[in-house]
Image (cartoon, rainbow, N blue to C red):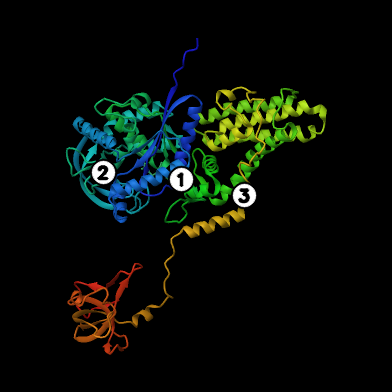
Amino acid sequence: MCEKVKKKEYYITTAIAYASGKPHIGNTYEIVMADAIARYKRMTGYDVFFQTGTDEHGQKIEEKAQEAKMDPQAYVDQQTAVIKEIWDLMNTSYDKFVRTTDDYHKKQVQKIFEKLYKKGDIYKSEYEGWYCTPCESFWTDAQIVDGKCPDCEREVHKAKEESYFFKMSKYADQLMEHIENNPEFIQPESRKNEMINNFLKPGLQDLCVSRTSFKWGVPVTFDDKHVVYVWIDALSNYITGLGFDCDGNHGELYKKYWPADLHLIGKDIVRFHTIYWPILLLALDISLPKQVFGHPWMLFGEEKISKSRGNVIYADDLVKFFGVDAIRYFVLNEMPFAQDGSITWQLVIERINSDLANIYGNLVNRTVSMVNKYFDGKLTEEREYKPIDEDLMDFALETVKKVDHKMDSLRVADALDAIFELLRRCNKYIDETLPWSLAKDENKKDRLNTVLYNLLEGIRIATVLVEPFMPETARKIYNQINTKQVSYNSILSWGNYEVNNKVTDKPVPLFARIDAEAKLEEIQKYLEAKEPEKMKFKDEITIDDFAKIDIRIGTILNCKKHPKADKLLVLKVKCGSDERQIVSGIAEKYSPEQLIGKKVAFIANLAPIILRGQQSRGMILTAEDESGMLETITVNEVEDGAVVK
Ligand code: ME8
């Protein structure tokens, strides 16, 4: 009897994105890669749990919320919705989305902190050092580089805080031993060496794990001036999301899936995941994740993607022009294993044309069209084999093995390459067998039938392999060739395509060839229209031009309504030893009483004029915004008569 085999668990996580802005295509690459791995594992029989989420606490987020004049919780709610929308747009099949503002998460972070304090691994002291706000990290004199943060290269400032510290050094040897005994733990190899040589060998310092300089974080239960360091909070998501309980009453998911099989993260945060996180787990007596993979970064051409460089590309814009699967394909295919990859609009178009339209789309389209043309859409059982067929079959079955091997070592781009090699091999098979010539000879009908069957079977096998990378495309092709044989088992041997099925009689091209020049122009226009309108200023002047205007501070001694004009006020203005009358058109905004005693800026050397019978010597300066809000330019401390320059 065949017993039901228990599936093997596979728990994969991504970094949790900062809920402080819209993720760009680099951040999006990570979740797409995790999704491809998760889908591949599911397809090959694993019981997968795929977790992602958002990192919602910390000073940076508190500041962003202030800038946006929002309550921090409302702000992160809004940002998280934007992130989720992009993850969903990219068709990512995560099982759980953790938010670090979720109550269950915060509660466990507090318990973890308490437990380590009670154990003596966390203690209170004082910290003085260089603080980098965007990275929320303290640095020593030796660590900063030219007065800047060694991680993000931004300005740091001196900061002193009473803090809690975590005894990292206590566990350093244990971690080192683990890294040495588990060569797969940190991948790729280059990142592992970096961690050992730059951080572990020089000796770990105790880590500052609480902050008092801001409020937006998880409060330390026994000392409410402090909030928990955002990285301790964020890293814990990998266990809290599964229902970890510090008191030992763990949820089912935690019992089933921990330890994680893979933490997929970017190269910039490997230190947090391979030093801080494992040490935290060692201190809690929890087993360590099996692997941390620090993927490379996606660059715009050769440059870092950044708002300040104005080169940010977003997934939703890419999808608008090229569709989800083309973008999934591009990012997965373009990112090498260890070196950075590159994206530009031009590169995306080139890749779609060369791979998706020419190789894949064309193969499917030509094959389905020929089955329609020569067999009314349905092949028969008759066969006539030639040795060349064997070659195609072997190639296809070898590809299945090769993809498995590549995916096992997380060489996702190489796995895709292998699948496209199979598609190329199928195209070559058409050139070798020349079906249109076979069709001219009634005696070669069985041979033609065999050739087209082999092509449909080759397409089917490649498409089952492609599904984790481009799920929608795979579904479309299954429909076009009309197959239900889409399981992984069905591609472990040749010949499972259902010969009696009728292919579609209306094959729609899967990926149309793109006219690069026209498309780039269209994209350019679209992006320009999206940009907020540029500020327009008056023509340039020189400093000498400006120096001609004598702007002064004057005290308003008296103010009355203009007897003949509703919009005007008549003001008596004292400027040092000078006293004068100025008429100003601000009666709709200010009552005379509001202005008396104010010290305002005015132009003192403007030629006098008569306004409705009242002399005006000068002009009160005001500022008016787009909504029509208007205010005088007022000072408090400076004496009247002072020069404005
Ligand atoms: O680091 N190419 O969040 P994040 C590829 N909240 N990946 C990139 C990239 C690029 N150009 N730029 C960034 C954080 N990434 C923390 C994580 S985990 C407990 C806390 C990657 O929103 C980056 O390396 O800044 C990280 O893995 C992910 O995007 C989210 O970055």
| Secondary element at tag 1 | helix
Q: Earlier in the sequence, mark 1 or mark 3?
A: 1
What's the distance in space between the residues labelled 2 and 1, CA to CA? 27 Å
* 76 lies left or right of 403: left
Residue 293 in view (yes/no): yes
Choose between 507 and 425: the one closer to the eye.
507
* Coordinates of residue 452 in the picture (x, y in percent): 71, 30
Give neighbour class at mark 3: few <14, some 14-19, many 20+ (Cα, 10 Å): some
Label annotation for residue 217? 2
- Amino acid type, residue under disc 3 in the picture: Ile
Of residues 617 and 127, the one nearer the viewer is: 617
Look at the image and tell me in which quarter the C terminus lies: bottom left
On residue 514, which mark appears? 3
Task: Establish if 137 lies above or below 554.
Answer: above
Please tell me which residue lies in front, 300 or 393. 393
The residue indicated by pointer 1 is 26
Q: Amino acid at mark 1?
A: Gly
Q: Is residue 457 left or right of residue 337?
A: right
Asked if disc 1 is less than 8 Å from ligand 1, the answer is yes
Where in the figure is residue 644, as x and y percent of width and height? 28, 77
Query: Considering only vertical position in the picture, is 512 above or below 454?
Result: below
Q: Earlier in the sequence, mark 2 or mark 3?
A: 2
